[in-house]
Amino acid sequence: MTLSRPAPIPVAPALPDFAQIEPIGRCNLACRMCTVNDRGDTVGELPFEQFASILAQLPQLKRLHLQGLGEPMLHPRFFDMVALAARQGIDVSTNTNLTLLTEARARRCVTSGLRSLSVSLDGASAAVYESIRVGASFDKVVRNLGRLMAARTAADSPLHVRGVMVLMRRNLNELPALIRLLHDHGVHELLVQRLSSDL
């Protein structure tokens, strides 16, 4: 008499604990190294209800990067998305060009539950920065950086802020000055990304 073993029960593969979701596919700038404006299709806003549905299908999620090629602060419910994910215990990070920051948005950055914010700065002078980030004002972005850091201090917020620089020939010499600029504003980390072209 032979005993047959029961068939093994299939085990579902573990779902990832990290996701990147693009809330909006548009940007208010035309940066020389970015292809967001060359997509050739109509990229709209991710509806908040659809975002909530995605989160509901990913109960194991621990980390969420809420950004793609578009500028996330263009989405009218961006901070609602952050708050929803944060309430579910998810660490939320994002990137921004910081051009759209207002006093109210600075406060939302430090009260919505956002864990990490990367600020794109590709130069330490108006001439170089504005030649790369077409449509942006260097002085305004630096003021907004000060506004953000002041809001973080006032709220005693644990929000992690770092700079991000796309390194290219036209801004290479500004790297030391950018480190000093960020340091003077209380930002003590800079991520440098290489660009594989001759810009």
Image: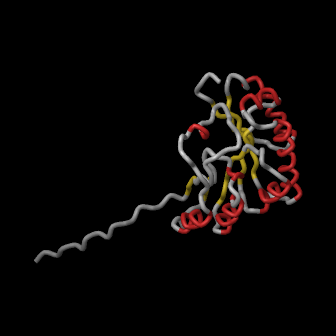
Residue 81 in percent (x, y) is at 66, 62
Please name the residue shown 63% across and 68% down the image: 88
* In this picture, residue 63 sits left or right of residue 123: left
Which of the 4 quarters of the picture holds residue 97?
Answer: top right
Identify the residue at the far left of this view. 1
Please name the residue shown 67% across and 64% down the image: 86
Please name the residue shown 87% across and 43% down the image: 143
Residue nearer the viewer, 195 or 29: 29
Residue 52 against residue 32 in the figure, above or below: below
* In this picture, residue 186 sits left or right of residue 24: right
Which of the 4 quarters of the picture holds residue 128?
Answer: top right
Residue nearer the viewer, 165 or 98: 98
Residue 107 in percent (x, y) is at 82, 58
Residue 64 in percent (x, y) is at 61, 56
Which of the 4 quarters of the picture holds residue 46?
Answer: bottom right
Residue 185 against residue 160 in the figure, above or below: above
* In this picture, residue 2 sits left or right of residue 62: left
Image quarter hosting the N terminus: bottom left
Residue 118 in percent (x, y) is at 71, 46
Residue nearer the viewer, 152 or 84: 84
> According to the image, what is the colour scheme of the structure?
secondary structure
Residue 75 against residue 135 in the figure, above or below: below
Image quarter hosting the C terminus: top right
Residue 13 against residue 149 in the figure, above or below: below
The number of callouts visible is 0
